[in-house]
Image: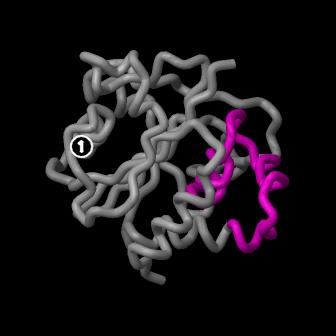
Amino acid sequence: MSADQRSWDAAVRHLYRDATEYIATGPRRHEDWTLDVLALMARAVPDPRGWARIDDAEENPERVGNPMWPFAAHPSEYIASRLKKIDRNSAGNLLLALTEGGCTLANLQYFTESPDELRAMARTVLARYGDEATYHTNVSKTGSAPGTLDFTRKVLGYSPMSVFTEDCGLVVVSDTEVGLFWNFNDL
């Protein structure tokens, strides 16, 4: 499956219409892709394809003089230590869990589409990065198999990367691009 700009933009804008999100893709310029994540957090690179970017904090006065806000400034080692690799299926479910605060699939009840239709949108989003992409998250809802997330677990654990009480996200890494999908919730 591949994604074109129109279907990818439509999926991203629909899934994250009601959430406080930062969704951006940038070029992968480093072997250590966490450096590319930092560039995305700092809004220092454009989308290499010119596709949709969602930045709900764009107009926030806190951003004046601090382009990383609401992300906290950290070195790449800090970022790397807090991101755990997950499988593609878990990444698709995580994209859906990021549609609201709380990082849960219970959020799907707020959509008129069926869970299967929403999962198809998540697959469209992931298709942009190709079949060889890797997926990394700061969320710890560890599943029964290594590299999986279990969204039936009620307890949410995560390694914070922002100034908010809760922030959960997904980093998608391909040979040429790095995607950042982040939800912020100030409980």
- Residue 161's place in the image compared with 85, above or below, is above
Residue at numbered disc 1 = 36
Q: Quadrant of the C terminus?
A: top right
Which residues are the magenta region? Answer: 90-118
Percent position of residue 45, x then y: 20, 45
Name the outermost residue toward the left: 29
Name the outermost residue toward the bottom: 1
Residue 180 in the magenta stretch? The answer is no
Residue at image point 73% right, 48% down = 150
Percent position of residue 132, x then y: 37, 70
Residue at image point 48% right, 16% down = 163
Residue at image point 39% right, 16% down = 62
- Residue 164's place in the image compared with 31, above or below, is above
Report whether 90 appears left or right of 12: right
Percent position of residue 69, x then y: 38, 23
Residue at image point 68% right, 48% down = 97
Please name the predominant secondary structure of the magenta segment in the image: helix
Specify the color scheme. Answer: one colour
Q: Looking at the rendering, which quadrant does residue 111 occupy?
A: bottom right
Q: Is mark 1 on a helix, strand or loop?
A: helix
Q: Residues within 10 Å of mark 1 (few under 14, many from 20)?
A: many
Report whether 160 appears left or right of 27: right
Most foreground residue, 136 or 183: 183
**Three-letter amino acid code at disc 1?**
Asp
Percent position of residue 74, x then y: 31, 20
Residue 106 in the magenta stretch? The answer is yes
Q: How many marks?
A: 1
